[in-house]
Amino acid sequence: MFAWKGRKTIILTLDKYPKTGYFGFLKEFSISLDFNSILDTQSMTHQTLFPELSDQRIVVPFKSQLLKWIGNKQRFAHEITSYFPNDFRSYREPFLGSGAVLGTLRPAQGFASDVFSPLMEIWSTLHDAPSRLKRWYRDRWNRMDTGDKTAVYEEIKASYNHSPNGADLLFLCRSCYGGVVRFRKSDGFMSTPCGVHRPINPESFSHRVDLWKERTKNVSFFVANYRESMREAKKGDLIYCDPPYCDSQTILYGAQEFRLNQLFEAIELCRRRGVYVALSIDGQKDSGGKTCAIDIPSGLFVREVLVNCGPSMLKRFQMEGQTLERHRVSDRLLLTY
Ligand SMILES: C[S@@+](CC[C@H](N)C(=O)[O-])C[C@H]1O[C@@H](n2cnc3c(N)ncnc32)[C@H](O)[C@@H]1O
């Protein structure tokens, strides 16, 4: 299914329902192509990178996280994005989290949402007042740097729990243990202890704000349940869904109710309208872990790719830093096109 053409490997077609990742082929590309020159000549405002490729396109990795978020796709976003259609109208990401795929894609027009409003306050502030975002981070970082680290962290956490807000959440997600923002089921309070690491300094954070502001300049941010956001999608739009993990994320994102079956229904409605949908779901856990039994409605997706996701952050947190070698998780990427 592959043809060689000079220095480029061109993927002509993918098998229907391939069950393996194609990351190795991307590595071939990264050796032989000069990505900077590609970016200079191929304007990202036109959302076609390689129109001659029928199935997969090349996407430059972007690994500079703005936020730390459990389940984030920063390390693999370029791989996921490489399976997006060459041409689409607007891009929609209804389970935004830390927006790894959005930031990597840099859409010419986008709509990004999440049901978690303090998180969306961070994104709206990035869009409307990036210097305020920098100040939020710098003020808290300075307090921590000049005071007792854990005590200051606990003060910021108490402030967040008293009145959930983007400014505190921003600093907490960068300074909490393992970058795992989680909430107690009983009262919804954020419960993660202080991390052992030193959060990045305000200068580095400000630089990331500038990068992300530029990459998301064409995106509208809003608070919404995924169903509202998906309802707005029109023919030719692309939706990327990265829903909460099926087993444990209810305590990680404020105990929100999430049902995969309802998401499948929303995807089916989009598919019928001619909207392209890509869905990430957590794949197999090779050992020890619970395997999520997922019943995927037949006929909904036409392809599946295993994206190589490396060790699971969630596992690391639960195991308090034990080795992860035997706990690898692969994400499944299901495509309606
Ligand atoms: C796995 S995370 C997304 C991670 C993201 N791809 C990233 O790179 O950081 C899932 C997100 O879905 C959000 N979420 C959970 N239930 C939701 C719902 N019903 N509607 C919209 N967003 C929801 C959570 O707040 C969380 O940010």
Image (tube, rainbow, N blue to C red):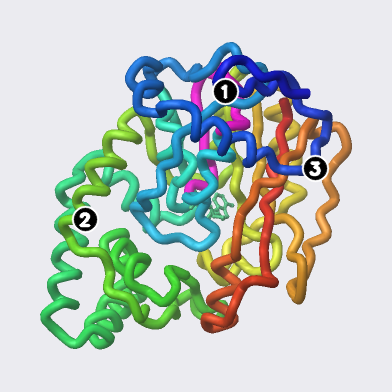
Report the residue at 53% width, 28% height from top.
Answer: 58
The stretch in magenta equals: 82-96
Q: Earlier in the sequence, mark 2 or mark 1?
A: 2
Q: Quadrant of residue 216?
A: top left
Report the residue at 47% width, 43% height from top.
Answer: 113
Question: Can you give x and y, in whole percent of width and height, for residue 325 in the image?
Answer: 64, 71
Disc 2, SS = helix
Examine the rendering and report whether any part of residue 231 can be seen.
Answer: no
Residue lying farthest to the top in this orientation: 52
Q: Which of 58 and 108 is in front in this view?
A: 58
Tell me which amino acid carries mark 3.
Lys
Please tell me whether residue 260 is drawn above or below residue 3 in the rendered image: below
**Label disc, if present, on residue 136 of the rendered structure:** none
Label 3 sits on residue = 19
Question: Can you give x and y, in whole percent of width and height, for residue 182 in the image?
Answer: 49, 72
Q: Label 2: few (<14), some or many (≥20) within 10 Å?
A: few
**Label disc, if present, on residue 204 of the rendered structure:** 2
